[in-house]
Structures are given as structure tokens and as C-alpha cells.
Image: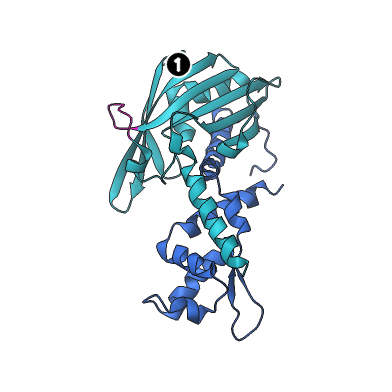
């Protein structure tokens, strides 16, 4: 099952988008690939700070980095955006977490019902 | 099937629970049980009022801890379908603590978030176990801007496409 991974990814995407600097970086990358140095230019931020933002975007699958060792230009990957393109999808991780808790709660209510092999 | 899931504007989650259908029904309709699982991690549900009959109202308060202290978010709604142990449908809107509906954008939600959403819970008795299908959907028509959140992202995607073509 890859659902959990998908949900985690979705959470990452939303977390990544919930930041003005990162959205600005995405907007810049929409005009073409750029190096970290180029991306840092418009911001009053240190390179490590910008790199951190780029790592968040990378983890969310929104940005790809090139392999060329020296520059490793960043490019936009729009596929992750398609996954979040309904308002409703933002609720999926919250519901999944709720039903996990419901499961736990049910197990607590009646420990006998669940002969959990993982117990102990 | 009565409703074809318009999955574009809905979350549909299917789960099987190792508990009888009567108990899963109570998870949704008994405030004490509901409070035990509904709140997000680190949040609590100080108030859950449920008049579980068609036309009956519900009000839920969620209290989340923020760096600025506890913050309460209220939801109000109405039960639309109540078929015991089988099907529960209720509407949900953000509100103040008196149950007056407030607009999602006033609550800091993205532009175009539907003012009213609908939660549908369909239960199936599997003999001691229960299959549950939960659908959380925007209520169409009521909020013409409901697609705004999607549109904003579509716009961004289109922008990317346009510029990426060069």
C-alpha cells in the first residue's frame, strides 16, 4: 500500500506551499531553471536559508535538482501541484489521522475484541 | 448508487473497523465517543452538541494549541439523513460560538473554500466488523467561488506550463 506515503507527500506539499518565500521561489522557477545563487538574489536571506527552503520544496516533489555537481540548477516539477488541486484533498490527511485515532480508541474500549499480534 | 462521487471536490475514505456497526455509529453520534477521536493531535473537543435527527442541529468546538495560546474553532451544521447504523449525512460550516456561520476566508481559509461542506458516512455491517465510507464534499451551488482554491492552483500550474514551454 502506498496510501500513507501519498498522504505524507501531500502533507509535505501543503507545508511547502504554506510559505511566501517558497511560493516566490516557485514563481521564479516557473520562468525557467535557476541555481541556488540566482534564486537567493531577490531575497534578503543567506544561502543556507534559501537552500533550506529549496530542500523543503524538493522533499515535497515541487522542485527537481540537476545532477551537475557545481551548479545543480533547480527546476520546477508541477506534478505534485496536481495532487493538491482540490480544496478537499487538503482534508485527507486530517481524516486519515482521525480514523487512525478511532481505531486506537476502539481497541482501548474493548481490548478483548482485538487479539493484536503486535501487542507487547 | 444514489450519489456518484464527484471526486474532484470531495475526499472519499474507506476503512474497515474491527468493531460492530452499532459501535461505529456511536463514534459519530455519541458526543462522548466523538470527542475521543475527532480532534486533531494536540487538540481537544470541549463542546460537541448533536441533535441526531433529520433537521437537527450540531455544533462542535475544536480547541487547538497555538504559540499564541489556545484557539477555538467552531463548526455548526444540520443533520440531513439519519438512518441508524447505516447512513449519516450532515452539513458543516465554520461558525462563531453561537452558531452564526462565518465565511471561511474570514477564518483564514484559502479564497474559494466552500462555505458549507457535507460529511456523508455510509456503514456496512460485516458481521462484527464494519466497513465505513466517509465522503467529505463541498456543497455545490451555495458557494459559487467554491472552486477558487483549485483555480488558484490551476492558474499557478498554467503559469508554469506557459513559461516552461520556452
- The colour scheme of the drawn protein is by chain
Identify which residue, B117 or B31, lies in the foreground: B117
Q: Residue at x 54, y 51 (%)?
A: B154
- In this figure, which residue is indicated by the disc labeled 1? B52
Chain B takes which shade in the image? cyan
Q: Nearer the viewer, residue A19 or B152?
A: B152
Quadrant position of the N terminus of chain B in the picture? top right
Residue located 49% across and 28% down the image: B118
What is the magenta segment's predominant secondary structure? loop
Residue A62 visible in the current orientation? no
What residue is shown at x 51% (from left), y 65% (from top)?
A26
Instruction: Pinpoint residue A43: horizontal percent, then vertical percent.
Output: 39, 75
Magenta part of the protein: which range? Answer: B95-102
Q: How many marks?
A: 1
Q: In the image, is A4 to the left or to the right of A48?
A: right
B78 magenta-colored:
no
Pinpoint residue B123: horizontal percent, then vertical percent: 62, 22
Residue B98 is one of the magenta-drawn residues: yes
Amino acid at each position: 500500500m502506498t496510501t500513507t506515503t501519498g498522504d505524507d507527500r501531500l502533507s509535505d506539499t501543503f507545508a511547502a506551499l504554506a510559505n511566501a518565500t517558497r511560493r516566490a521561489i516557485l514563481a521564479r522557477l516557473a520562468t525557467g531553471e535557476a541555481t541556488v545563487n540566482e534564486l537567493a538574489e531577490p531575497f534578503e536571506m543567506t544561502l543556507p536559508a534559501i537552500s533550506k527552503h529549496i530542500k523543503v520544496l524538493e522533499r515535497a516533489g515541487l522542485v527537481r535538482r540537476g545532477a551537475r555537481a557545481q551548479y545543480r540548477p533547480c527546476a520546477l516539477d508541477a506534478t505534485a501541484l496536481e495532487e493538491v488541486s482540490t480544496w478537499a484533498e487538503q482534508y485527507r490527511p486530517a481524516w486519515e489521522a482521525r480514523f487512525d485515532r478511532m481505531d486506537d480508541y476502539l481497541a482501548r474500549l474493548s481490548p478483548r475484541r482485538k487479539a493484536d499480534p503486535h501487542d507487547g | 448508487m444514489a450519489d456518484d462521487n464527484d471526486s474532484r471536490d470531495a475526499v472519499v475514505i474507506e476503512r474497515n473497523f474491527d468493531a460492530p456497526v452499532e459501535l461505529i455509529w456511536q463514534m459519530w453520534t455519541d458526543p462522548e465517543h466523538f470527542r475521543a477521536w475527532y480532534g486533531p493531535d494536540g487538540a481537544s473537543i470541549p463542546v460537541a452538541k448533536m441533535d441526531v435527527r433529520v433537521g437537527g442541529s450540531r455544533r462542535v468546538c475544536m480547541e487547538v494549541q497555538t504559540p499564541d495560546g489556545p484557539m477555538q474553532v467552531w463548526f455548526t451544521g444540520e443533520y440531513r439523513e439519519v438512518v441508524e447504523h447505516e447512513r449519516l449525512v450532515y452539513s458543516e460550516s465554520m461558525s462563531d460560538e453561537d452558531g452564526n456561520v462565518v465565511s471561511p476566508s474570514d477564518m483564514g481559509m484559502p479564497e474559494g473554500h466552500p462555505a458549507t461542506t457535507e460529511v456523508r458516512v455510509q456503514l456496512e455491517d460485516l458481521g462484527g466488523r464494519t466497513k465505513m465510507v466517509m465522503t467529505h464534499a463541498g456543497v455545490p451551488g451555495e458557494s459559487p467561488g467554491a472552486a477558487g482554491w483549485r483555480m488558484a492552483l490551476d492558474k499557478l500550474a498554467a503559469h508554469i506550463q506557459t513559461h516552461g514551454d520556452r
